[in-house]
Image: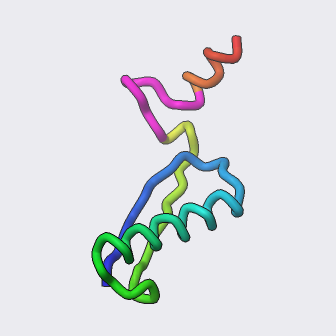
Amino acid sequence: MPLIQATIIEGRTQEQKDAFFKGVADVAAQTLNAPLPSIRVVLTEVPAEHWSIGGVNKAQLDANKAR
């Protein structure tokens, strides 16, 4: 039973997350030759303030771009 974990910054719509689940599960089933019902996908969403790029949190980076 493949278990795939992904971490993203929160803010996507449920439709986007559902499309991600389907796309990842389909690719895993095809490439791993695993039955689709055996594929598990866990999506963890984190606030932009908890995501750092180069030592600066993503929320600050986004705010600086908006200026």
Across and down, in percent, residue 39 comes to: 40, 80
Image quarter where the C terminus lies is top right
Q: Residue lying farthest left?
A: 32
Which of 14 and 37 lies nearest the eye of the viewer?
Answer: 37
- Residue located at (46% from left, 72% from top): 26
Q: Is residue 3 left or right of residue 15?
A: left
Give the quadrant of residue 2.
Answer: bottom left
Q: Is residue 13 left or right of residue 62?
A: right
- Residue located at (59% from left, 30% from top): 59
Give the quadrant of residue 1.
Answer: bottom left
Asked if the magenta segment contains residue 54, the reply would be yes
Q: Is residue 56 above or below residue 34?
A: above
Which of 56 and 37 lies nearest the eye of the viewer?
Answer: 37
Q: Is residue 63 above or below residue 43?
A: above
Across and down, in percent, residue 40 comes to: 42, 78
- Stretch of the chain drawn in magenta: 51-59
Which of 27 and 67 lies nearest the eye of the viewer?
Answer: 27
- Residue located at (37% from left, 74% from top): 30
Across and down, in percent, residue 29 comes to: 38, 77
The count of marks equals 0
Q: How is the image coloured?
A: rainbow
Across and down, in percent, residue 12 comes to: 66, 51
Asked if the magenta segment contains residue 50, the reply would be no
Which of 7 and 56 lies nearest the eye of the viewer?
Answer: 7
Q: Is residue 39 above or below residue 51?
A: below
Q: Is residue 27 above or below residue 37?
A: above
- Residue located at (49% from left, 60% from top): 44
